[in-house]
Amino acid sequence: MAPRFEADMWLRRALALILVLQVLPAAVAPPSSSVGPELVYECLVKDDGSANVSAVFRDLREAGTGALWLMVPRNESYFLTTLSSENLLQQQVGPAFTPSGGEYTFYSNLTISYSSPFELSIGWNMTYAALIAEPYAIFFSPAIGYPPGINAKLIVELPSSTTAAFEFSHSPVMRSGNTLVFEPIPHDRVAIAFQVSGSLDAALLESAHFKFRVPKRYEHIGRRIADFYENVTRVLDGVFNTTLAEVRVEFFVPSTLADLPIGGFVPITSAYRLGTIYLNIFYVRTERGYMEAIAAHELIHHYLATSGVSPDVLWFHEGMANYVGIKVSELSGMGGASLAEDLIEEASLIENASLPFVFLWKVDRYVEGYSPYQHYAAAYRIVATIGESLSTSEDELLPGITFFSSLFTNMRQHSVKVTGNDQIGRLIYATANFSKDTFALLTSLGLRVRPVLIELEGIEPVSVLDFGSLVARMMYPILEGPITSAIEIAASEDLSRALMIMTEADNFLANFGASLLVLLFLSGLALLANVRRGEELPPPP
Ligand SMILES: [Zn+2]
């Protein structure tokens, strides 16, 4: 498989269940029967992936009272019928919460009290119960929730076009043809990877900068993302100071449940060229703006590559793709905002001093000891920290965006290609007009800026602010420390420490080569040089 950028962090919260992959057991047991209250969910999936969903609750015990809560679609587009309406004592609809306290986006909590015998039926239509791009299809159940003590089951009838159902989360307890019976776990989803007959009927949508190839049944979603792309292109062209040549985009349905969390990916065709953007159509099941955040993320990989940032600097690619991508997705909805919260929260659990692990992240190779999600979180945090430290009052989209825009202008003007971590550090330092604070920040992150290389690479500061000579400004952050140390050490006559610092200064000088910078540096360190030659130390001040 060609190397590719994967947005595999998506749905960190919702898809933990997918890790529990199971296959159909050889022997299946019939569903247990019970005289207590029972709840039967049924999903009848049609060939287009939509489904009729029903939840039937029965408590046939004589002369009792009971209470029940269920999750129902939030938009109230469900219908509710009871066997005898006078047995329904009370009903109330409120927000539905996950066990960890998050609020469901698409579901409400319907709480009722009743006198038995009692029977309740709730039904609704689900447009995207299964996502289908022939031959691949994924069924993902509606949110299921009910109080303990109820015997529940979920019956899924896959479309008549089904040729094979091969992966389940969780295992069905019974199967007959395309009908599968599950014992659901409250708040957990049931997912099925299956295949269907027929060939993909695709539509080609062309806009000014994009060519979308999408299954016809999702043409309207293709148009939604195409419109979003045209809108954000106007913003991103300004940020990256470049325009993209025609970009191809396709929707896909994962062939396995393990691939469900992948929001999208872009094959890397060569150092600075990327291929078709693939977007997981499954994410149409998320809040508006979420799929756009994924789409923007993948598009920004294209902008970065076109600007000359190699995929070798992966943390910068992924950090920028999320930092900028999530923000521009807000143009079409706030679904992406939760992603930023998740990344910030995850990054806050990583020790500051450990963040630089992410500099070792390579395409197809995570750093041992850290989860994939921690890589994205650390990259986001570092890019956001740099952006925030260099924010100006001109920033409209997000902190530091004017700075990053200058950085890409700088790269373009000097035909700079960025292939290494330290190199992006130098570029940031130069674009920040050799700011002492930026040098300190980059150094604290573990980037070796080595300013002399900036001159060799031909990068120049963007600002024309008069800040003394360029050389002096470059040297200042480095000179200040050694000179101060030298004075202090000379004062305390600690020769061995002075020698140690001189060795460091020597190493530093070794990187400079013969240039005006060296002369300046040497004169600045004349005091240290005296110490090193073992000459008489100057008297303490
Ligand atoms: Zn990515």
Image (tube, helix red, strand yellow):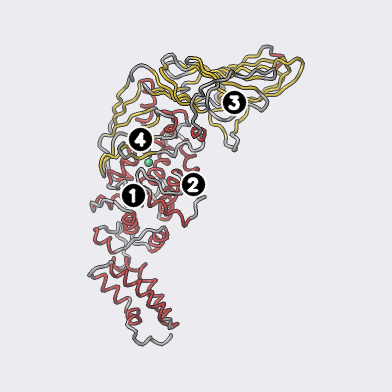
Position of residue 534 relative to residue 100, above or below, is: below
Q: Quadrant of residue 88?
A: top right
Q: What residue is shown with label 4?
A: 231
Report whether residue 400 is seen. Answer: yes
Give the Cα separation between the discs numbered 2 and 1: 21 Å
Position of residue 366 relative to residue 171, above or below, is: below
User: Disc 2 or disc 1, which is closer to the eye?
Assistant: 1
Q: Quadrant of residue 465?
A: bottom left
Mark 1 sits near ligand 1, with its Cβ under 8 Å away: no
Residue furthest to the right in view is 63
Give the Cα separation between the discs numbered 4 and 3: 36 Å
Which disc, if any, is residue 71? 3
Mark 3 sits near ligand 1, with its Cβ under 8 Å away: no
Q: Earlier in the sequence, mark 2 or mark 3?
A: 3
Residue furthest to the front in view is 27
Which disc, if any, is residue 313? 1
